Image (cartoon, helix red, strand yellow):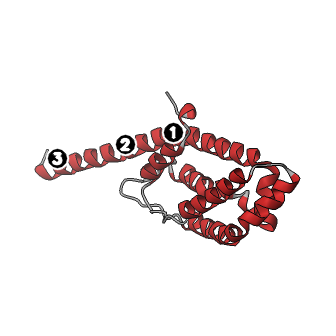
Amino acid sequence: MTKARLGALALGAALAAVYGFNCVKNVVVGRRVRLVCPALAASAAERLASTGPLFDKLFGPDAPLMRQMPDAVVGDTCVQLERELSWYRWNLGRTIRLDRSRAHRQELVAVLDRAIPLCVSRAAAANAEHPLDQPLAEAMCQVLKTLRSTLDTPLVDASPWELAAQLERFVPAPARRP
């Protein structure tokens, strides 16, 4: 065998090994994403369900949009990740743009900007219908402010593998895999 053929063969073997690593990593990370995303969605749905009528009172006509919050926070990212983590996709060195998630978050930030100034009065009105103590209503208003700052945190475009690792950090401890 000539040196050129041997070099070409070595290069081909190296490329096959790198592509193989990429494929295996996609499969492994894809499995984790398929466990993490439903856990995150269930956790968010549970929190939304527990807020009940108070949630609707606090957000008024914007409540249906705010109920889409889990999609803005993780749902859009999960859908995009599941698509990007197909076993055959080249993800080594790739960056995923999270433009849809950014747009969705901006809509929610606008809703929160409208709701925060009205929060105390809406909480008081909800308190009249459903007896709550005023400190709980004030705490809810503080939660809205915290949520606003959380949603306003810039999303960083990253590789599918890095985005999956970020999502895993949000999973409630009991739902994490052993």
* Dot 1 or dot 3, earlier in sequence: 3
Residue labelled with disc 2: 20
User: On screen, 89 above or below 20?
Assistant: below
Name which quarter of the figure residue 128 lies in: bottom right
Amino acid type of the residue tagged 2 in the rendering: Gly
Which x, y percent locates residue 159? 42, 56
Q: Residue, x 59% and y 44% (percent of image)?
A: 37
CA distance separating discs 1 and 2: 19 Å
Q: Residues within 10 Å of mark 3 (few under 14, many from 20)?
A: few
Q: Is residue 167 visible?
A: yes
Under tag 2, what secondary structure?
Answer: helix
* Dot 3 or dot 2, earlier in sequence: 3
CA distance separating discs 1 and 3: 39 Å
19 vs 157, left or right, is left
Classify the position of the N terminus by image quarter.
top left
Pick out the residue farthest to the right: 129
CA distance separating discs 3 and 2: 21 Å
Q: Give the tally of numbered discs.
A: 3
Amino acid type of the residue tagged 3 in the rendering: Leu
User: On screen, 44 above or below 77?
Assistant: above
Q: Which mark is residue 23?
A: none
Residue labelled with disc 1: 32
Residue labelled with disc 3: 6
Which x, y percent locates residue 57? 81, 60
153 vs 142, left or right, is left
Pick out the residue farthest to the top: 178
Pick out the residue farthest to the left: 3
